[in-house]
């Protein structure tokens, strides 16, 4: 799609990892490599000079290089049939401690986890949707045993290797009155041609996540005056949960947002720029819902896309975060430590945390004298990967489940800066 096709926004940046060759990529970071910019990105002609600096070119270089690496690994995995849909996890048996659901501890993460395996007796599945692509998936549940008025909407996170390319793709598009938002997340939610978010789709050719889920919530809100909604998601799913609220607010969907009780995200990447963050701050105040962003230890995904300052699209989280270290000690912070992941002073602590998590995963079955506590070979493989690539194993959903189960946290009034 060329620049002339983008009618909705005149401020955007689209990276092109499929079209750019490795030679183009490495020439781009040379002193006169700016001439290659059109082979790597699509942006308005008037904005080209914004990316002349070596810092901006280096960020574009890193993003495209990582996307190429992820896509290569994905293709290799498919070739050797290594990509599987099975989810390895701890077993949910009666011996497991019951969840003490305080305000900051939400059963949504457990619903998000179990929804990929089975539908528990205490919930009724309302919707299992695939939208546009098989990897964009959402699950909607209604509680039946405790409070039948609570509807939980869980967005499934990264489940395939190729999905990781979305997290490292720093493409963005500006929405008038909202701010700059990550392009990959918007496309996963149902962004239309010409970067457009129309209020209604006259004749949709396929189901799109945002429009399908919005209609479901509209119907529930009209039929049940006491309905309350909870949105949640892990990784990419957390970003989609936040972005879903964003577009609802952009379309002034008051009937749905007034029934929104809380948004809980786990290992959520950054979604937009500071202007977007302010828009979401105003939205949470206007509709009076709670937003909790969980960050476990040195989780890599929670720290990308990078907060790059003024010379590039500076992605920024909004609100505070519920931070847990590798020993499940929690506290409320305005921002997580090691904000941009790549600071060298955190390299050794990242390796030590990964080593401790690996040892702990092996010791727990022995300490508890039961193999029911064995995390599974899939999770064990991820623990080993974390010993070689810092902070990757910290992103596992299992870490967030354990944090909400076993974690201890300071009162929310003790919010501190990292």
Image (cartoon, rainbow, N blue to C red):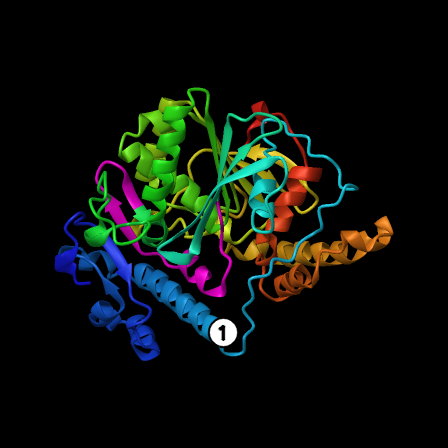
Using the rendered image of the protein, determine whether residue 257 is visible from the camera's viewpoint: no
Queried whether the magenta region covers residue 177, the answer comes back as yes
The image shows residue 383 at horizontal and vertical percentages of 66, 60
Which image quarter holds the N terminus? bottom left
User: Is residue 247 something that shows in the picture?
Assistant: yes
Residue interval drawn in magenta: 155-180
- 156 horizontally vs 182: left or right: right
Residue shown at 54%/57% (left/top)?
344
Residue sitting at 54 percent across and 75 percent down?
A: 81
Outermost residue toward the top in this view: 225
Task: Point out the image quarter for the C terminus.
Answer: top right
Please tell me whether residue 362 is drawn above or below residue 38 in the rendered image. above
Between residues 348 and 223, which one lies in front from this camera angle?
223
Q: Secondary structure at mark 1?
A: helix
Say whether residue 352 is left or right of residue 209.
right
Q: Nearer the viewer, residue 83 or 339?
A: 83
């Amino acid at each position: 799609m060329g620049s002339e096709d983008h009618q909705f926004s005149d401020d955007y940046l689209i990276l092109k990892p499929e079209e750019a060759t490795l030679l183009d990529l490495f020439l781009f970071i040379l002193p006169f490599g700016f001439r290659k910019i059109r082979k790597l990105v699509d942006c308005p002609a008037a904005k080209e000079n914004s990316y002349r600096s070596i810092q901006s070119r280096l960020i574009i270089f890193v993003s495209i290089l990582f996307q190429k690496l992820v896509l290569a690994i994905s293709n290799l995995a498919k070739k050797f049939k290594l990509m599987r849909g099975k989810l390895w996890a701890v077993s949910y048996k009666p011996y497991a401690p019951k969840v003490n659901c305080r305000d900051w501890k939400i059963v949504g993460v457990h619903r998000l986890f179990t929804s990929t395996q089975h539908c528990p007796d205490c919930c009724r599945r309302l919707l299992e949707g695939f939208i546009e692509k098989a990897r964009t998936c959402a699950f909607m549940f209604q509680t039946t045993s405790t409070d039948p008025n609570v509807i939980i909407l869980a967005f499934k996170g990264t489940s395939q290797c190729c999905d990781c390319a979305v997290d490292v793709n720093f493409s963005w598009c500006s929405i008038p009155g909202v701010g700059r938002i990550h392009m990959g997340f918007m496309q996963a939610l149902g962004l239309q041609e010409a970067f457009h978010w129309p209020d209604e789709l006259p004749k949709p050719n396929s189901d799109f996540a945002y429009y399908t889920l919005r209609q479901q919530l509209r119907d529930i809100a009209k039929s049940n005056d006491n309905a309350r909604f909870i949105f949640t998601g892990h990784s990419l799913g957390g970003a989609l949960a936040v972005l879903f609220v964003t577009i609802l607010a952009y379309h002034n969907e008051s009937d749905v947002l007034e029934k929104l009780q809380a948004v809980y995200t786990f290992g959520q990447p950054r979604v937009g720029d500071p202007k977007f963050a302010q828009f979401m701050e105003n939205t949470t105040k206007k509709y009076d819902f709670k937003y909790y962003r969980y960050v476990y230890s040195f989780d890599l995904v929670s720290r990308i896309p990078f907060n790059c300052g003024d010379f590039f699209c500076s992605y920024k989280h909004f609100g505070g975060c519920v931070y847990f270290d590798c020993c499940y000690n929690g506290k409320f912070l305005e921002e997580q430590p090691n904000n941009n992941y790549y600071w060298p002073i955190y390299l050794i602590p990242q390796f030590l945390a990964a080593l401790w998590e690996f040892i702990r995963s092996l010791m727990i079955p022995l300490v508890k004298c039961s193999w029911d506590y064995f995390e599974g070979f899939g999770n064990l493989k991820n623990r080993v990967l974390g010993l070689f690539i810092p902070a990757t194993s910290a992103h596992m959903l299992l870490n967030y489940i354990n944090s909400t189960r076993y974690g201890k946290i300071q009162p929310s009034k003790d919010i501190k800066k990292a």
